[in-house]
């Protein structure tokens, strides 16, 4: 579980290419054998991909009303 | 008779940049009037500083950096959250991952709508970091400069913000 926590903590940095190669290799090996961490990594990548798509999307009309103020 | 020096920010450039900047500001501050004010402030600052534009980055990136700086200043003035990362966040490691990825079943449009809503609910600095790096594609150095934070702090903001959004996508698909 400690290994899972460490891997999940590093996933964001890994997506940004901010980790040394040896650490990326360790994460890859872990994801190959840990389905929960692999699912989180996949959904995090999907989240970042969606954020990229927002770049050219108009802001919804209710954009000013999101969330509590 | 000498010509006027060439202007980087022509009227056409400003017209083209305004919608981009307004979208960024609205996603950041959630209030249209405040967003408009910030865009105007940033455009004035950009015009005043255009001689310093180094052409190492794209014009859009440069003005979004200036706008981000204005937004970060606003957040600091509001003092809604400390500049240094706190430890009040349970973190993604506390999440129980589903047995299969649910967001893959949601349509792209629905997923984008969830992301839009969730962006409005995450802490301001996390939102701004995500908008700069993931939406506007600023590099970490540019984002750190605009936010006035160190690289390690930016990485924490990105980690937390991205995982909150990821969790929102998971929750929406339940």
Image (cartoon, helix red, strand yellow):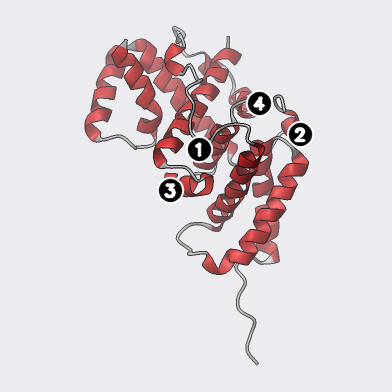
The disc placed on residue B134 is 1
Q: Spatial distance from mark 2 to mark 3, Cα to Cα? A: 32 Å
Q: Are labels 3 and 1 on one chain?
A: yes
Quarter-of-image position of residue B17: bottom right
The numbered dot on residue B117 is 4
Sequence-first tag of 4 and 3: 4
- Residue B138, visible in the rendered structure: no
Q: How many marks are shown on the rendered structure?
A: 4
Q: Gap between marks 1 and 2, in whole Å? A: 22 Å
Label 1 residue SS? helix
Front-most of residues B115 and B73 = B73
Callout 2 secondary element? helix
* Residue at image mark 3: B141
Query: Residue drawn at (61%, 29%), measured in percent from left and top?
Result: B119
Residue wearing tag 2: A61
Residue B93 place in picture, x, y as percent: 42, 15
Tell me the residue at 76%/34% (across/down).
A61
Question: At which x and y percent is residue B29?
Answer: 67, 37
Query: Which chain is home to disc 3?
Result: B
Q: Residue furthest top?
A: B99
Chain of the residue where label 4 is placed in the rendered structure: B
The chain containing the residue under callout 2 comes to: A
Neighbor class of circle 1 (other Cα within 10 Å; few <14, some 14-19, many 20+) is: many
* Callout 4 touching callout 3 (CB < 8 Å): no
Q: Which of the two labelled residues, at mark 4 and mark 1, occupies the earlier sequence position? A: 4
Mark 3 or 1 closer to N-term?
1
């Amino acid at each position: 579980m400690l290994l899972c926590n460490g891997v999940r903590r590093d996933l964001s940095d890994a997506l940004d290419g901010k980790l040394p190669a040896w650490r990326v290799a360790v994460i890859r090996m872990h994801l190959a054998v840990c389905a929960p961490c692999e699912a989180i990594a996949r959904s995090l990548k999907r989240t970042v991909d969606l954020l990229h798509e927002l770049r050219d999307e108009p802001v919804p009309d209710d954009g000013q009303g999101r969330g509590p103020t | 008779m000498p010509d006027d020096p060439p202007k980087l920010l022509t009227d056409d450039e400003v017209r083209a940049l305004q919608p981009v900047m307004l979208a960024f500001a609205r996603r950041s501050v959630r209030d249209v009037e405040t967003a408009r004010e910030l865009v105007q402030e940033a455009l004035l600052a950009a015009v005043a500083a255009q001689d310093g534009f180094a052409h190492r980055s794209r014009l859009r990136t440069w003005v979004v950096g200036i706008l981000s700086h204005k937004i970060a200043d606003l957040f600091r003035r509001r003092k809604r959250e400390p500049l240094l990362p706190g430890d009040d966040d349970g973190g993604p490691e506390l999440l129980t991952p589903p047995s299969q990825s649910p967001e893959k079943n949601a349509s792209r449009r629905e997923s984008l709508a969830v992301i839009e809503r969730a962006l409005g609910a995450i802490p301001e600095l996390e939102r701004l970091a995500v908008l700069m790096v993931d939406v506007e594609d600023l590099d970490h150095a540019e984002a750190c400069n605009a936010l006035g934070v160190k690289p390690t702090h930016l990485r924490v903001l990105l980690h937390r913000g991205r995982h909150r959004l990821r969790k929102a996508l998971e929750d929406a698909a339940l």
